[in-house]
Amino acid sequence: MREKKMQWTNRGSALLLAGVLLALSGPFAATGAAGAARTVAGPAADPAEGPDPIDFAVVVDQSASLAQKDLDRETDAAALIVQGEISERSRATVIGFGSSEKPGQSPVREVCPPTVADAAGRERLAGCVQQLRRRDAARTGPGTDFPAAIRQAVARLTGAGTGAGAGAGAGTGTRPGTGAGAGAGTGAGTGGTGGAKAPAVPKVLFLLTDGRLDVADSPEYGTDPDSRRANGERRLTEELARARAAGVQVWPLGFGTDIDRAALTAMAAGGHRGACSGVPGSAPHPRVVGTSAEIDKALQETFAAARCARVAHGTVGRPPADLTVVIPPIATDGSLTVSKHDPKVRVTYYDPAGREVPVRGEFDGSAFEVSGQDGPVEALRVKNPLPGRWRVHVEAPEGHRDREVAVRAIWQGRLRSDVTLDPASPRAGEKVTVQVRMQTRRGVVVTDPRQLAGLRVSAELGGAGFAPFSFPLADDGRAPDAKAGDVRFTGTFTLPAGATGDLELVTRMEAPGITSDRRPLHARRGEDAPVLTAGLAVDRAPVHPGGTVRGTLDVTNNDSVPHALRLALQDGAPGAGLAVAPTPVTAPPGRSTRIPFTVTLGAGAPLGELGGRIAVVDTADGDLVLDTAFLDVRVEAPPTWWDRWWKYAVAGAVLLLAGAVLVGVRLAVRRRRRDLTGVTLELHRDGSPLFTLTIGRGRGSDGTFAFTVDEPYGAPPTLRRVGGSAASTAHVLRRAGTAAYDDNF
């Protein structure tokens, strides 16, 4: 729409035809043929693991009602999703649109033709999308021509960019369809395949607008404003029907206060109703925000919903600043997007370990690829990102630090399914239990159910002799699931009676931001009377790197001859260095046998859940799998010297302490027994006491006390303690047992 409509004098069909011819001779005339030449063919399917590609177009309103700041914000939002796309096999197209109201004008302006979003393509997209900031009133009218915008996008998404028109006008890929009296154009109708079957590569159209359909001054829609509005609405319905037939989803995003919400809802409902998953919110739906300041966040979230990804919102700050955003452990592919607004802002990226990562190349198991370093929006695509809090450091020279910089991460977890069947080779009519657990591309087993909140798991079984069918798997603790929340999804099916041979099981995971790699599990229908039955059991005790895990194989051979079996390891974690012994085993005929085996871990096996499984196969029957079992083992760090011997060390210390205490007590008792302290000596004459001497503390503690008898002249004799050399001639009192005696008596 526009703030002020330009008056247009209807000059009839002759003027309309002249306008069409003039447009064909102008800059857009080559768009039909040249546009087809520029269109990049969709990339061939890449067998390597990675996110599924999508083919998408961003269609941006450039009508006269938009202020320059609105155009800038629309441009930044478009740049965020074309540069933040996580698959290098996706294609992106960017189109601006207004209206066509006079000769030389086109309602659409294709600024970025279909471009594969690989390293070089993202750099091209980073540059061409900036053309949306400049509105050329001479080449694009001020109105809002939704039908032409949708037609152009559908044509590019389906590859139907050219065609011959009837009548006087030659068709172009950028012009709307036929007007009265002027045969013309192509349109996406040629790209329709009929029906609403989802294309192999999803085709998605994102439309940004601040208003409503406005073709009142576009002559090709009629001769007066009322007929033009009516024809515009009819044409919009037709173009949406073509989009639906071509399998193109339409995701409208409106901003501002003059939004026709009903029209946006009709657009979302009018296109293809397919979705990347059955998760609520994955099917096309409109979204409206208050102002253009919110559209970058809203468009990124809408884009993530359409391609089954998630957006993690990080922090915001002005340079210089350290911004952060968290990438969860289940993410296998992602992009860090930085809304710089100013090309002068420079960005450095640090992983959760605090290490600066390269902007191109590989580092510690991850692959990095940057785009838009010299533009207002920058994105770092990361394959196998390290989970945790990433730090984004932003710097800018003086005079370029007034705008806030925001960091976000768009990510997807493409999980590997680790599947077991029980029995591994079921018979027709037999009930089969299917168990699935998830691993990341790094081989990390997902054990935290919170990381898989809202996950839906199902499986589809196909094979010879029966129609494919699907069934759900759950982790709710209800039979057949053994335990809720153990991240092992379990389900059952009964093999149809018509099954005759090979079986293929494909699991599907659906949750916000989570998809599955859809690797098939191949099996075969078992014989009606099994010749061999086998059961594997693995100890679940913790093990250390370099240690061994013990298990048993119970096998029954109903045949009359022995069978050569083989134990094999499957889906082991990288670096675990697993080895099983014995590898070949023999099942004797006509009886049941229990065979012990061991799985040895490498010295460098990573700590945590071991992952992988062990299988027993019949080598005589084309390696038919008889049974499988998960290696439900946790690898722990080896014990230290203290961990091994602390009990003995503590016991020895206690014994030594007890011995020391005992010796001390015995010495104390012995010393106390010899101590003469408190003994009193009495000097008698003729039975009468003359003098007493009591031994004081510390004077006889060694069991001896030396004394002498002094006989002063004219006085009675006395007793006196002596020491030193005089003690050798003195009397010595000694303790002997419980008695004391004098050596000189």
Image (cartoon, helix red, strand yellow):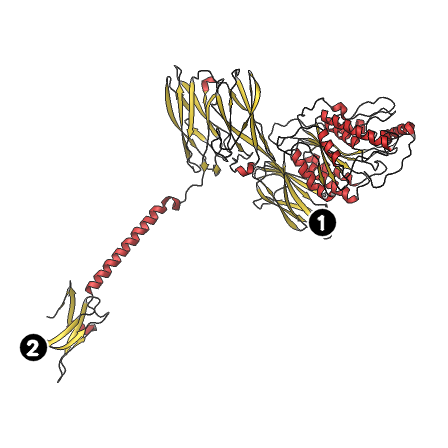
* Other-residue count near label 2 (Cα within 10 Å), few / some / many at <14 / 14–19 / ≥20: few
Provide the secondary structure element on which disc 2 rests: loop
Give how far across and how far down residue 645 sits, in percent.
Answer: 36, 45
Marks counted in the figure total: 2
Label 1 is placed on what type of residue? Arg
Give how far across and how far down residue 180 sits, in percent.
Answer: 87, 26
Q: If the image is split into quadrants, where does the N terminus sit?
A: top right
Provide the secondary structure element on which disc 1 rests: loop
Give how far across and how far down residue 49 sits, in percent.
Answer: 59, 30
- Residue 459's tag is none
Label 2 is placed on what type of residue? Asp
Q: Name the residue that disc number 2 marks.
A: 686
Toward which corner of the image does residue 592 lie, by quadrant?
Answer: top left
Q: If the image is split into quadrants, where does the C terminus sit?
A: bottom left
Q: Can residue 730 be seen by looking at this rendering?
A: no
* Other-residue count near label 1 (Cα within 10 Å), few / some / many at <14 / 14–19 / ≥20: some
Q: Note whether 571 is above or below 639 in the view shown.
A: above
